[in-house]
Image (cartoon, helix red, strand yellow):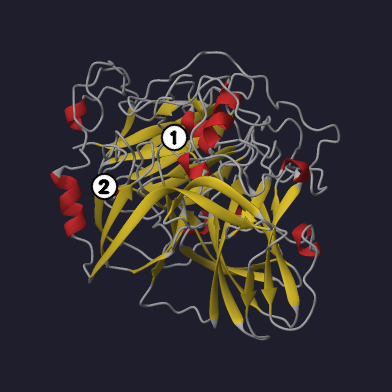
Amino acid sequence: MRTPPTRRAVLGAAAATAGTAFLASCSGESDPDRRAPQSGGANAGGPEHGIPHHGKSWDEYVSPDGKEVAEAEAKRRSGPLRKFHLTATPSRLDLGGGLVVGSWAYEARLPGRELRFTVGDNVALTLANHLPEATTLHWHGLNVRNDMDGVPDLTQRPIKPGGEFAYRFKVPHPGTYWFHPHTGVQQDRGLYAPLIVEDPKETLKYDKEWVVVLDDWVDGVGGSTPDSVLDELSGGRGGMDHSGKRHGSMNRTEGADEKDEEGRADETDGKNDADDTRRGGASGSPGSPGRRSGPSRIMRHGFSQLLDSHGGNVDYPYYLINGRVPKAPTTFLAKPGERIRLRIINAGGDTAFRVALGGHRMTITHTDGYPVQHTTTDALVLGMGERYDVIVTAKDGVFPLTALAEGKRATALALLRTGMGAPPAAHVRPKELNGKLVEATQLSPHPSVALSARKPDRTIRYKLTGTMKAYDWGFDHEPYSPERRRPVAAGERVRLEFFNITSMWHPVHLHGHSFGLVGSAGPGHRASHRREWQWARKDTVIVRPNTSVAMEFEADNPGLWMLHCHNIYHSDVGMMTVLGYLR
């Protein structure tokens, strides 16, 4: 049996699409000096690959440990020192209902222990790696200094088994975030936890707070692991090692390119009960490249009308809220009339969730950590990596918080209990799921976080490419390399335009920055530079098939930053790229 190489990938995810303008031929950037080999550097793997990266030599880019990064960090607000120690370890996890699985987790908990900071805190967190593979930590949505961003072989060296890494940074802004590895498909195990940054100037009024973490689960069920799932999806080709090179064979996997016969999601329930693994399961060790461990996990049918796409690539046996299966849901206790702030996080690897609280309407207050003009809705859709904060006024009784896995015929469940009453059935579908649904492109930013009216200094265009059959997801048909970069400069307003020419939806995530959604991309859809055209401030956005999305951000956090799909299986085979600040 072969020993699997350590996999390298950035974790992917999710967001909201705008408009239908679409040009498959649009690609490139506003200053397309494209093809010059890179000279060496410890942070990127050296010059020997001769990777083209838009006419810029390696030493023209800000290094993650460069003086520019240190200078930007020194300008941030500084508060008290907060020390933490975290251990990543193989664990036995109880998902409820008698289901115990072998996986990997932080402190043997699922989700991992919530971390709470306050804006300005100086964080000193040491991660001890007790896993059999190298790992890192990425602070999803938190715009930390570049050398603390947790991308192996780009911003830091991987933490080897038995090793430790000291993360040190100032907390720059408030909001709802989370943390997870940025190595291979490790995040599709139990390696994730919520991260909440409190605002000392918070004006939102509420009585209680409920942190809700959504997940799709396969690890340790019927012998499956995320690595074996990746091998099945990619035909044994696997992901990437830490040099950015693919490993394994180039066999292709036939997959789920077809819609289901009715062209819509079949919302029946309980399809995988026969596949349960109880009081045992897999050890949590990675599968061998090219070998399937457990039953097939390819999603061959199912379609989401909401996403205009297959729901995803992976047919998960379970969907969880706060680490629990629907038959044994977690319960949040409150009193009738109390205002509850829900911080909802999609920590899934391959699943968008439509979320509703039975018997209640929700008032959206934040998305991806940033405040929006308050908007009332019945339901939300969250792609992988997205977060929404909402306020609800609790009614009297027992109510289901249901997360429907889009296009996958199953749900996750938690309960809100404020009084007497029997809990609803595990498969309950509250009517609010089919009520009013508000997406990010229908939200306006709070004036305090809206981008100023300004013409972009630089426009960068990407095509989202690949097919399920070939499993060759990427940007502009190019394989990922940490040395292939698009340049930006400090102080610029940067416009990113994405053209999705695939038949799959993709949640696109930008590290180190938040962006304003500004509409569709391409000719006839240039930025208006008027504040009223700007939508929500975010860091992750859903891009539906055959559509385009444009976003703008301020280049105010120097370094080398990942841009990738937050579907972790897409990113692991190459759907990721790098934005690099010029010196």
Q: Between 19 and 356, which is closer to the camera in this rendering? A: 356
Residue 184 badge? 1
Q: Furthest-top residue in view?
A: 250
Residue 566 horizontal side relative to residue 44, left or right: right
Assess disc 2: are there few (<14), some (14-19) or many (≥20) residues with their C-alpha within 10 Å of its C-alpha: some
Query: Residue at position x 74%, y 49% from top?
Result: 410
Residue 352 lies, in percent from the top left, at: 63, 47
The mark total stands at 2
Q: Residue furthest right?
A: 262
Q: Nearer the viewer, mark 1 or mark 2?
A: 2
Q: Mark 2: which secondary structure?
A: strand
Q: Quadrant of residue 84?
A: bottom left
- The reply, left or right, for residue 199 in relation to residue 278 is left
Task: Measuring from the top left, give residue 536's x and y in whole percent.
Answer: 51, 57
Q: Which mark is residue 367?
A: none
Q: x, y percentage for residue 366?
A: 52, 65
Q: Farthest front residue?
A: 279
Three-letter code, disc 2 = Glu
Q: Secondary structure at mark 1?
A: loop
Q: Foreground residue, 229 or 527? A: 229
Instruction: Left or right? Give the position of 250 relative to 318.
Output: left
Q: Residue at x 75, y 27 (%)?
A: 258
Q: Which residue is mark 2?
A: 164
Residue contact at pointers 1 and 2, CB within 8 angstroms? no
Q: Is residue 533 above or below residue 362?
A: above
Q: Quadrant of the C terminus?
A: top left
The residue shown at (63%, 49%) is 279
Residue 341 point in image, percent of width and height:
56, 73
Lower sequence index among marks 1 and 2: 2
